[in-house]
Amino acid sequence: MEKWNKKKLAPVEKVQEAYNRITDPHVMMGDNIKQQLKELAEEDYRVFASGLLPNTDNVLGIRLPMLRKIAKQIARSDWQGYLETAREDSFEEIMLQGMVIGCAACPAEERLFYIKEFVPKIQNWSVCDSFCAGLKFTRNNSELVWDFLKPYFKSERAFDLRFAVVMLIFYYIQEAAISEVLTVLDNVRHDDYYVKMAVAWAISMCYVQFPGQTMIYLKNNSLDDFTYNKALQKITESLKVDKETKKQIRAMKRKP
């Protein structure tokens, strides 16, 4: 009888065996890695993950911690060769490429090259946000990366914009930059839901860290009503904002 994990989604031995094969440098290319990823798929998790990703019908069902392990293994081998042959047939294959770009050891300029190549592949919020979270090299290259991001704030493509805004959230909400950050967010213009939600999220994070400056902005901005109200909602959902302040924030909501 096979041993199952706690959630009974896949046999532990099967997943571990597939993981061992996929981290063999001889199978980390193209169709080989695609087949090995399929062996790591869990049907129940695929159903769950697909429910969080509207309009994404190519989910295999592989947990993100497993993908991160694989990415780290690839990054220790010929990761450039992997990226050259990598496919985009599934959500996980795209996610894996982004993770490899984030954790591979390389100069900042080389990483930016691969980031530029990858951003057009972003088609959903999950790949976008996970990719941004992995680009920790930004902390030591803030000016270089900020200059790189500027054109994305002007893009007409929704996930170019979300990429830029989420990068701002993770790495640029700082005291010295808060005025510029709020100005940049105020100038984002796009009708896409995921862009507006990213901007709302960013503004709420600005408020949590710098309430004084952000409150001044909230009283005088050019945000559309949806984004503005969502920003207020996210502020009130924060555990770092006290009850009295939340009451004040709710009273600022724009009425239809």
Image (cartoon, grey):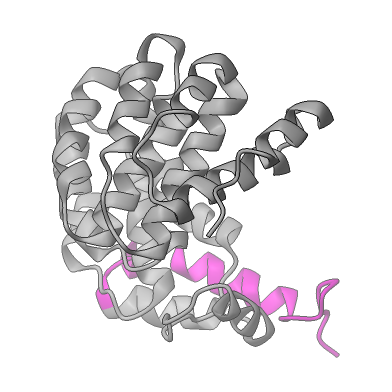
Q: Which residues are magenta?
A: 1-30
Decide if residue 77 is in sight here: no
Decide if residue 128 is on the left or right side of residue 8.
left
Residue ranking furthest to the top: 176
Residue 18: x percent and y percent?
Answer: 55, 74
Residue 13 belongs to the span the image colors magenta? yes
Decide if residue 108 is in sight here: yes
Towards the viewer: 66 or 143: 143
Decide if residue 246 is on the left or right side of residue 177.
right
Decide if residue 215 is on the left or right side of residue 119.
right
Towards the viewer: 239 or 56: 239
Report the residue at 48% width, 45% height from top: 228
Residue 203, compared with residue 237, is above or below; it is above
Residue 162, compared with residue 185, is above or below; it is below
Residue 15, compared with residue 95, is above or below; it is below
Q: How many marks?
A: 0
